[in-house]
Image (cartoon, coloured by chain):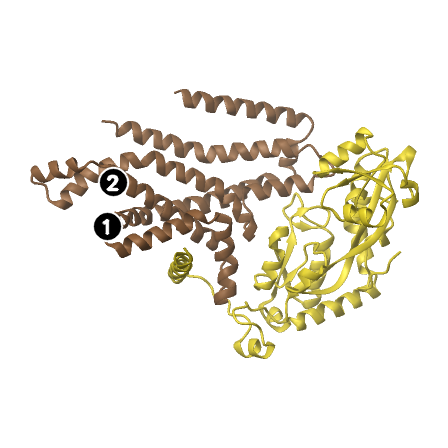
Chain colours: A brown, B yellow
Amino acid sequence: MRASAIELFSLSSLLSLQNTGGRERGIGILFDGNNFERLMGGLFVTIRISLLSAALSLPLGILFGMLMTRRNPLTKALSRIYLDFIRIMPQLVLLFLVYFGTARAFALSLSGELSAVIVFVLWGTAELGDLVRGALVSIPRIQYESAAALGLTPLQTAFFIIIPQTVRRLIPLAINLVTRMVKTSSLVVLIGVVEVLKTGQQIIDANRFRYPTAALPIYGVIFLLYFLVCWPISLFAGCLEKRWRD
Amino acid sequence: MKKSMAAAVFLSALLLAGALSGCASQSEKTGSSAQSAAEGKKEGSASFRTVEEIRNSGVIRIGVFTDKAPFGYIDSKGENQGYDVFYARRIAEDLGVKAEFTSLDPASRVEYVSTGKIDITLANFTVTKERAEQVDFALPYMKVALGVVSPEDKEIKSVEELKGKTLIIAKGTTAETYFEKNHPEVKLQKYDAYADAYNALLDGRGDAFSTDNTEVIAWAKTNPGYVVGIETLGDYDTIAAAVAKGNTELLDFLNEEIRALGKENFFHKDYEETLKPVFGDDTDPDSIVVEGGEAVKN
């Protein structure tokens, strides 16, 4: 309840910002020509890249997390290296590596969007995998032992006892990762993909000489758009958490 | 530690290869192997497209800025516009192909053209020695020098007038190096950001402000009461199109194109269309425009 009050507050302060911007014709440039459509198109690119990556990372991350709990030293070492590599590398470097690196090394020309999805899936799988591993490890041993004592098979134990508890612990963390993906997707401009933030900057720049003060209100609108994407995700997570509460 | 890094690199390459083969990617093996052998390109360097390949595909991929008005920007209809874009469209027209624009950022301009992601960089690319090692520059179509802007009532028209006065500059710009080296008699007041430097001029903390002439001319136009007393100063830098290293065929085409366009005063027309509305009538086009690839100092 408290969280949503804060969110409403920021929303209203943003709306007032929008109003003052309107008076000096800052926000008005949004509706010149098809600027607004372009901004929406940019938003769609942002959503497409981040949600597609999130959807692919989810199953892959769960698999990877399960792999990480294996005792086999080889899988352990390999997954550790993969995780650390992705974690240490800034996403920007990864984007450059995939986008330009593949062109240099294999003379393979990937589109910017495909490269972005590859990088975000690599990143999401690594991070989510680690979260899954953490959640799995955090289930006390006694849960397995009790299940065995009740005569459940390992498959039944996983399905009825372990996975439901793991998923509950995972939801807030996974949502956090998805919203971070939405925000990080603004980096893809550097490999030529024009998303919502870049479209906003283009609109600001095209009016730089006529309306030099347009920047703030436009960024305000962009903030609102990011908020509108991330808020439902966070609401959905809240719903799930509530429903699964013991 | 070194070993694990090597392993990490290997692993990521492996993962990448896996991811790539999984995704249906269109592999554009452009430059044929025979050609790359003939060019004697260094191992691992990406391919570029020859003029014939561009013509056959019907599309030339040109990288431009989309947020640097008035040189490369997007208008409210969503179309690429600007001084660079005007020239880019003409290149496509003369090749008989369609222009496909890619939005570039300053940091990735070299990489785009040298990996063959685009055929030509036309994003206000200043010719420098370091860049010339990585890409091939065509003949220039524009130049930038320093400009000095000052209040109208105390206009500064020559460097001599600056003696003993305070000049505002932004740190790390060509203006800083130029004045430190050539005019130590001018007192400098340095600021980190352009916005701060302009504010200092507006507040009267200095007598004049110097940076790229394209920048000060556009600024003076939107700030009444200020004039650019010195439009060109110091060594100018030239701005040119760039192609992948070794793509001589496309480079020759561009150079011939520039010479031919010079005969019809194409870049003055370009200036009229794209820069004049921003720079105003008082600015001399020849302080910016280079015609026929011959940058003459004025």
Q: Nearer the viewer, residue B201 or B68?
A: B201
Residue type, label 2: Val
Disc 1 to disc 2, C-alpha distance: 11 Å
Which residue shows up at 86% across the image and 60% down it? B296
Can the viewer see residue A33? no
Q: Residue at x 60, y 76 (%)?
A: B39
Q: How dense is the environment of label 1, judged by Cα within 10 Å: few (below 14), some, or many (20 and up)?
A: few
From this view, report whether residue A188 is shown above or below residue B122: above
Name the residue tied to disc 2.
A137
Indicate the secondary structure of the residue bearing disc 2.
helix
Percent across and percent down for residue B147 are 83, 46
Q: Which amino acid does label 1 sit on?
A: Arg
Tell me if A63 is positioned left or right of A155 in this view: right
- Residue A198 vs B50, above or below: the answer is above
User: Counting residues from the N terminus, which is met first, the one under dot 1 or under dot 2?
Assistant: 1
Q: Is residue B106 visible?
A: yes
* Vertical position of residue B95 compared to residue B173: above or below: below
Provide the chain ID for the residue under circle 2: A
For label 1, the SS is loop
Q: Quadrant of the C terminus of chain A?
A: top left
Q: Where is residue A124 in the image (x, y as percent from the top left)?
A: 39, 46
Q: Could you say which disc has been placed on residue B282 in the image?
A: none
